[in-house]
Image: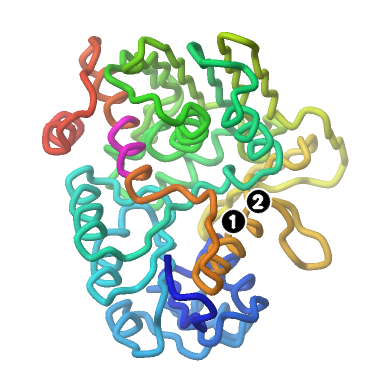
Amino acid sequence: MPTKNKEIGLAIVGCGTIGRIRAEIARAYPGVGWIGLCDIKSDIGQKLAEDVQADFFTTDFRELLARPEITATIIATDENFHFEPTMLAIQQGHDLFIEKPLATDARQSAQILSAIEETGVDAVIGYTQRFRRRFLAIKERLITGQIGDVHSVVTRAFMNRMVPIATVQRTQERATLTPMVVSGTHSLDMSLWLMEGKKPVSVYARSTDRVLGAWGTKDSTFGIFTMDDGSIFSMNISWALPEVWPGAVYGIEIGIVGSEGVIDIEDTHRDLVMATNVAQGAGYAPEGYKAPDRHVEFLTSYPPGDLHLGQLWGPMREETNAWYQRLYAGLDTPHATAQDGHRNLLLTMAMDVSAKRGEPVALPPDPAELMAELS
């Protein structure tokens, strides 16, 4: 772990929705002594720099990451542009927070992981849902053996199609921007974190693209994993629900069956419903995306959290502050590791390959073979 009570010099590459959240929390954290920002869109980046009183701003990540003040870097660019700034931050010896995935190219993800392991930098991946109270409570029950040996897990995720449309319209490189790689990875990570110690050895999946095929992606992917101890894990996601679906982003259900008990998780947010004549926007609406009007909302269904008094409250605040505490005070945290992030990418891509082939895929897959299949 990093040295305790070492003032953090923070670089944030990418000043969009998530980069802004992390920067605003950084400005309020007393252990962050210097903040530098980078975004290729100068208007967005300069506005954030003004709002958080950043010490430095540039449109060139190389110029930012060369600054001597920096001890830690957040990579918050679009998914397709993680590789170069991440590799440079590793070379500079920075502690790292990388928004998922490590990369959208499995070969580049493997390179990043190798560089992290070789240099020994402390690197974590953004899987915000690990920091929600309900999942931490469940994790503790599993660690302490309250339901015995887990042998069956079923996971289902439903998402509003505004998310994939907003994501894919920003790039023509869409081959790997699939339901599993972009969004199902959160549910996959949560399930494997709760099943910690069990290793997937094969997966069989199927997909359909009746709605979102026109956007260059899939509607749904359903898969079944077999683990090394014979336990089974079903992972299903559809991110093609209509724009009027009340979930701002997504809801999941997870059933965990063990030899001595069961944990049944309903995380669909249907317990808080608002209907209003006031139009509601998209939960995730990057620049350039015009969300259709919605008038029914599942409150708390925006994964980062909820606004009150001009501040974000919820798991992303917990996750971000926990990372700053990890760096400043040397605390252990539930963050996903770089190894977790690479594994998750390979597994989500293996599901896509299995669906394409119509046959099971042995795990772990070779990154080069995955990219050959998916390109």
Which secondary structure lies at badge 2? helix
As drawn, is 286 to the left or to the right of 202?
right
As drawn, is 38 to the left or to the right of 134?
left
- Placement of 330 over or under 152, stated as above or below: below
Q: Viewer-proximal residue, 163 or 237?
A: 237
- Can you tell which quarter of the image residue 252 is in? top right
Q: Viewer-proximal residue, 360 or 195?
A: 195
| Res. 319 mark | 1
Instruction: Check the picture and name the quadrant holding the N terminus.
Output: bottom left
Instruction: Check the picture and name the quadrant holding the C terminus.
Output: top left
Q: Viewer-proximal residue, 321 or 36?
A: 321
- Can you tell which quarter of the image residue 346 is in? top left
Q: Main secondary structure of the magenta part?
A: helix
The reply to whether discs 2 and 1 touch (Cβ–Cβ < 8 Å) is: yes
Q: Which residues are magenta?
A: 342-347
| Residue 135 lies in the magenta-colored region | no
As drawn, is 356 to the left or to the right of 187?
left
